[in-house]
Amino acid sequence: MQTLRALTVLLSAGLASIALADAHDQVRADPARMQTRIDALAGFGANPEGGVSRVAFSDADIEGRQWLKREMVKLGLVVRTDTAGNIIGRRPGSDSSLPVILFGSHIDSVPGGGNYDGQVGVVGALEVISLLNDYDISTRHPLEVVSFTDEEGGLTGSRALIGKLTDAAMETMSNSGYSIREGIARVGGDPERIEESAVDPKSLKAFLELHIEQGAFLHEDEVQIGVVEGIVGIRWWQITVNGVANHGGTTPMNRRTDALVSAAELVLAVNHIANSMEGRQVATVGRIEAFPGAPNVIPGKVEMYLEIRDLDATKMQQVFDAVQAAAADLSKQYGTRFDFAEIDTASPPAPTDPAVRDLIAVTAEKLGYSYRRMPSGAGHDAQDLATITPTGMIFVPSVGGISHSPREFTSAEDMARGASVLLHSILAIDGAR
C-alpha cells in the first residue's frame, strides 16, 4: 500500500510523471503477437458464426485451459490450478517477501459468444509477461497471471478467491450441463477443499484487469482507453401483479381489473424514472409473464422482473423507491396489487481504488493515449477482488458496442494499447526502476 499512497500524494501534487518515470518507457505491446494468441484461443469451441461457445467446464473450456497452461509454461511461469480451478502463473520478484501483483481475466464464454470478452484480459496478461521477458525487466514484487474459472456463470473463480463461494452456489447447474461443483472437479479443482482457494488479502499488492468495454462509448467517441471508476451494483426484484381473471369477451372494458395493463404501465414508468433522474443509472424489465395466458382470458396475475444498476447504492435505492411509488399509484388507478420481492443475488457497487484509477489514467496519458473515466455496466471478476485489495480496470473499445456475440470485435491495435497501459501500470505499482 505504501507505493499506492505515495502515488496518490504525487498525483495530487501534479508530479505523477515523475512517479512513472522509467527506463522502459518506450516498451509497447505487440499487436500481432496478441492477435495470434486471440486466434489460437478462438479455435477452442469455435462455432460456425465465427465466435465461440467455450462455456465453463465444457470440453472446449478444458482444451482452452490446457493451451493457456502451455503458453504460461513457455513464458517461464510456475503454473498451478487452485482448488476452485483458477489457473495461476507466477513470475518471481526480486523480493519474495513482498505481496503479489495479480492481473488477468477469464477465457470461458457465454453460449454463442465472441472471441474478446475475457480473452483480451488473459492474452493481455500473457503479453505483459512476454514483454518483461523480451526486455529482461525484473520486478520487486512477484507477479501472478490469473485466468478465473467460470466468470460467465457467476464469477465462480473470483468468488472462491475471496472466500465467498458457497455450497449452495456450487450446486447451481452451469451451461455445460454440469453443476458448478462437478465442473470445478472436472477442470482440476477440488470443491471439497474450496476454502483453500481463498487468498489472504495481505498477500496481494493490487489486482488489475484488462477488458473490452462491451459498450459503444469508447468506439463511438474514438477514445482509446477506459479508466474504470467501478463496477455497477445490481439488484433484482420479482414483481407480482394481482388483478382479476375474467372472460375476455363478456367483461366490459370499464369493469376489468387487468393485471397485464397495470404491469405494462409499470414497465413504461420504470423506463421514464430511469431516464428522468440525473446520473447513469439503468433500470430494466427483461422478463414478463401473464397468467393464465389464454388469448380470451383477462390476465389475473402477472410476474415480472426488475433489474436496477448503478455505481451508487443510494441512487439504486432512489430508483426503486420511485418505482414502488409508481406502482402504488397504478394500484389506485386500476384496482390491482403489486408485491415486490427482492431476489437474493444482489451485487453491491464495487468502486475501483482511487489511487490505482489515477495511476492508470496518468499511465495512459504518458503513453500518448486518449482516455475516459467511466463505470462498467457489466459484472467482472474485478468486482470481487475490489473487496479485498486495491483494484483497477482498463477498458479498450468494442467495435459497435457489440459483445456476447460472434460479431464482438476489438482491433489488435486497441488490444495492444490496453496491454501497454497494463504493463506500465504494473511497473508503476511495483516501483521498478
Image: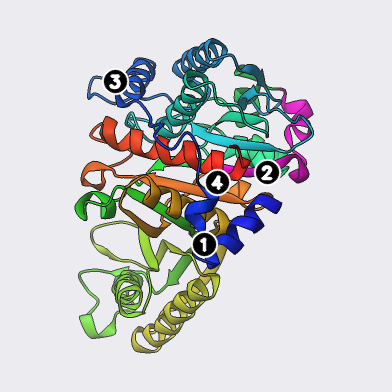
Query: Residue 141, located in which quarter of the rendered image?
Result: top right
Residue contact at pointers 2 and 3, CB within 8 angstroms: no
**Magenta region, residue range:** 190-207
Decide: is 59 above or below 145: above
**Of tags 4 and 1, which is closer to the observer?**
4
* Residue on which disc 4 sits: 382
The numbered disc on residue 124 is none
Q: Position of residue 102 (x, y in %)?
A: 61, 36
Look at 30% across and 52% down and name the residue there: 370
Q: Position of residue 405 (x, y in %)?
A: 28, 36
Foreground pick, 298 / 358: 358
What is the three-letter code of the residue carrying label 3? Asn
* Residue on which disc 2 sits: 205
Q: Residues within 10 Å of mark 2 (few under 14, many from 20)?
A: many
**Of tags 4 and 2, which is closer to the observer?**
2
**Residue 152 visible in the snapshot:** no
Q: Position of residue 74 (x, y in %)?
A: 53, 10
* Residue on which disc 1 sits: 235
